[in-house]
Image: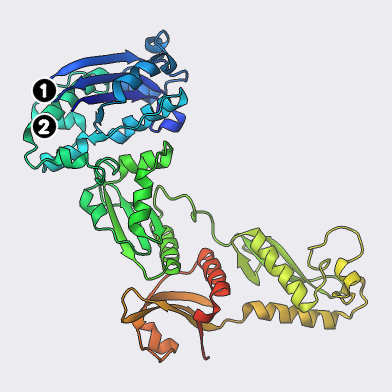
Amino acid sequence: MIYAIVDIETTGGYAAANGIIEISIQVFDGERVIDRYETLVNPGVVIPKYIQAFTGINHDMVKDAPPFEDIARTVYYLLHDKIFVAHNVNFDYSFLKNHLEYYGYSLHVKKLCTVRLCRQIIPGLPSYSLGKLCKSLGIELQNHHRAGSDAVATTELFKLLLEKDEKNFIKTSLERTSKEQVLPPNVPVEHFKNLPATPGVYYFNDNKGKVVYVGKAKNIKQRVNSHFSNNSDGKQKQNFLRYVYGITFQSTATELMAAILESTEIKKLWPAFNVSQKNPEEVYSLIMYEDQKGYYRLAVEKKRKQVKPIFTFHYKVHAHGVLQKLIKEFNLCPVLCFVQRDKQKCEELKEGNCFGACETVEANTLYNKRVLEAISSLTTRSSYVVLDKGLRDEEISCIMVSKGSFFGMGYLPKNFTDITEEAVYKYLHPYKENSYIKTLLQTHLSKFPHQVHHIAK
């Protein structure tokens, strides 16, 4: 087998928005280096100060260097028929694949990561960064963070791994079914093998065990695999590859339970790489006030501390949707509800659905009575459970809403019949409600009303 042992220096951490400033390729036949290629590269963009400090490569050094376009053909033919080897291989591979594809070359080769191989073949070392590995193993590395020196050191490291690989980890890693080529360098393959093909929530942990990402899935194993097996060259994937050291999970019986658990965990743990569901809760309010003519007015506006809302919403469109529904169901006036804002005659009055409150034809007492009925329909706080399949055959899943608020979820014995709050409480784990969970439940219940079992007051 012929290996291309690669190291690159770049202007940043992910390929989609950064350039290559240096590349070194050592072509290795398993015993000796049979070819080598090394050059600085003009990235065509500014090299950030911290990269200059980190690598020692500045603008003057690359201004007369070839752009990647000029070396793409050479790089491709050095790599395309060999096994691509690097320390944290998916970083180097993502950059080169991205840049080669931009200039018309499609790179598809097998990969080996010397970080992952070192963890398997030489376990128990204090650190697996290239610099500290070389120090631990007595490999010379004089000019760290320059592509040439790092590629030479990685070649010596790989030669040592070939010699020590008594259990054929390298051969196993190259098999088509192996996850070694796609997983982050520091995640044990056992973490992936232990993932179930069930709904649930998965957690990515950093080197200190802190959760940096939470995700939900219909199939946990399949979803986690998709994070690393795709060809994304974006920031999120590179963050996962660089900072994820462990994967854990919680199985749930249903996708709804997984979505609820994901939301509560994001709100509780505030993971660094989660973006969604970190925005403020309940931004919009439905309010009521009495105008100068004595008519109750309903309106949607941004939530304010000094105004007590009738109901709160995460999205403005949801608030307006509810208000439109109330207008239809209770014959309210769209003008008095600020839904129709032009100076034209009330549209619902023309249709006969508004009884003339906007023109003081209908008495305010009659109109206000319907407004209060509409509000009452929103604030009735019923209790119910959502019952569905369990994790095992002998149980059923249960999500409980108590007096209009999400309480928690868990699992009941399969033949459980005492559906009262007192009886169900002890089987459930309580969770904090948020507006996202409210929306999840409302959407689910509209699709699956047969799963709802109301609890008597």
Local secondary structure at mark 1: loop
Q: Between marks 1 and 2, how big is the CA–CA gap?
A: 9 Å
Image quarter hosting the N terminus = top left
Whole-percent x, y for residue 95 in the image: 38, 29
- Residue 432 horizontal side relative to residue 330, left or right: left
Q: Which mark is on residue 162?
A: 2
Q: Quadrant of residue 82?
A: top left
User: Which is more toward the observer, 101 or 25?
Assistant: 101
At 71% from the left edge and 68% from the top edge, which residue is drawn?
Answer: 323
* Residue at screen point 10% across, 29% down: 160
**In the image as oriented, which residue stretches furthest toward the top?**
64
Q: Residue 253, image x and y in percent?
A: 37, 71
Q: Callout 1, which amino acid?
A: Glu
Is residue 427 at all visible to an observer of this figure? no
- Which quarter of the picture shows residue 164? top left
Q: Which of 221 and 425 lies nearest the eye of the viewer?
A: 221
Q: Amino acid at mark 2?
A: Leu
Give percent across and percent down for residue 219: 37, 60
**Residue of label 1:** 31
